[in-house]
Amino acid sequence: MKDSELETMRKSFSTVKKRSNSIKESPSTKRLIERVREVKKYSIENNEELINQASDSFKRNDVDFIIAKNSKEALRIIDDLLLEYDCSTIAKAKSNTLGEINLKKHLEDKDIDVVETDLGDRILQLKKTDNKPVHPTGPASHLNVSDITDIVNESLGVNVNPEPREIMEAVRGDVLKRIESANVGISGANAIASEEGSLVMVHNEGNISIVSLKDLHIIVAGIEKIVPTLEDAISVSKLETIFATGNYVTSYMNVVSGPSKTADIEKKLLKNMYGAEKVAVILLDNGRSKATPECLYCIGCGNCVVHCPVYNAVGNEFGFNNYLGGRGVAMSKFIEDDEACYNSGLYMCTLCGLCTLNCPLAIPTNEIIENLRKLSTGAGFYPKAHGIIKENISQNDSPY
């Protein structure tokens, strides 16, 4: 990342810190933290049971439900679903899981136009190169108004001034025009309630509502997103919002429990009144079932990277794909392998523990990374300088 981008990112993070500090210590937030910690602990320990329950609930709700073992399988399932809809354009909402499986590149290679509907994600998409996000909920937090103005004017062939509202209106108009004919929407989910077979999605822009109204709505989420009940799912989503944005609740909270339907004519069930005629949920494993359990406690708020000294110094170079910072490094081991973990910044981490101190779930990321270093060394992935010291100690009884 450029120095100017790092500076803008740090300013954005400072704003989030100030906004969230005022409510993180409130009694209601502390109660919510304790509740979500219990929910996530139970959910990870009983993940297989909850998946089986969710399968039955989705079937009851007329939701297609498929488990994907890895990213390749998830993409194949998506391809099969799209064949029924003959789509050339897809309306996409923000999702780190879709970034994990490289959905956009996969579909663009098939000449399908994937249009990001989230403003930050769309700005990065228009940027075309060096466009990795820097925060789970604020992907373009490293770009200032001047940078964004240049990106929008060059990509869309417009001439907006460096004024946020003008930029927003230009991007919004372009997105709505591009997805007007789209019959497929695809998104992730913040949490999944196994008992009700419901998916919770939070957003401020209203874009997920648009995505979910397409004829086919595909939702891709990791197995760690499943919790027992809808009340639990709402709690997880609320806590994520507090630590990600500094607000108690987002503008919109969508709960999807099946296709659009009505029975207002002689109580005969009809699908596709205004929204999707088909909802398909793809639950992704992709190494999660082998991961260190604490890695799966993450609710995706990004508060760890906001406070991480390494991330604030180097930016999204520290992390793996859309999974940023130390947690991303940890997940890369299970999603891919030891080499990916090493290349994601395994030895960048100072093990200071600020990520854990500022994580609402108190995930011991520094301890996880320390353990992964041992495994990485055993697999032959470690800094060359460390190898030289090791050899010197072995041969000379001295690191020199």
Image (spheres, rainbow, N blue to C red):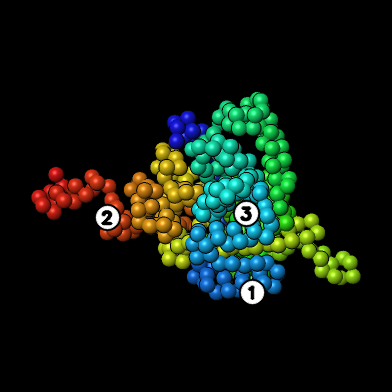
Disc 2 secondary structure class:
loop
In front of the other: 73 or 210 = 73
Q: Earlier in the sequence, mark 2 or mark 1?
A: 1
Q: CA distance from mark 2 to mark 1?
A: 45 Å
Quickly name the residue at label 1: 56
Q: For the image shown, how many numbered marks are present on the structure? A: 3
**Residue 326, x across and y down, in percent:** 42, 50
Q: Quadrant of the N terminus?
A: top left
Residue carrying label 3:
187
- Closer-to-camera residue (297/343): 343
Q: Could you say where residue 256 lies in the image, as x and y percent from the top left?
A: 69, 60
**Residue found at x 43% / y 63%:** 291
Residue 195 in percent (x, y) is at 64, 71
Would residue 241 appear left or right of 263 to someone viewing this image? left
Residue shown at 51% from the left, 39% from the top: 131
Who is closer to the viewer here, 168 or 185? 185
Residue 380 - label: 2
* Relative to 225, 348 lies left or right: left
Alpha carbon separation for disc pair 3 and 2:
38 Å
Picture disc at residue 140: none
Look at the image and tell me whether residue 356 can be seen: no
Asked if residue 180 can be seen in this view, the reply is yes
Vertical placement of 147 versus 391: above or below?
Answer: above
Would residue 33 be found to the left or right of residue 163 on screen?
Answer: left
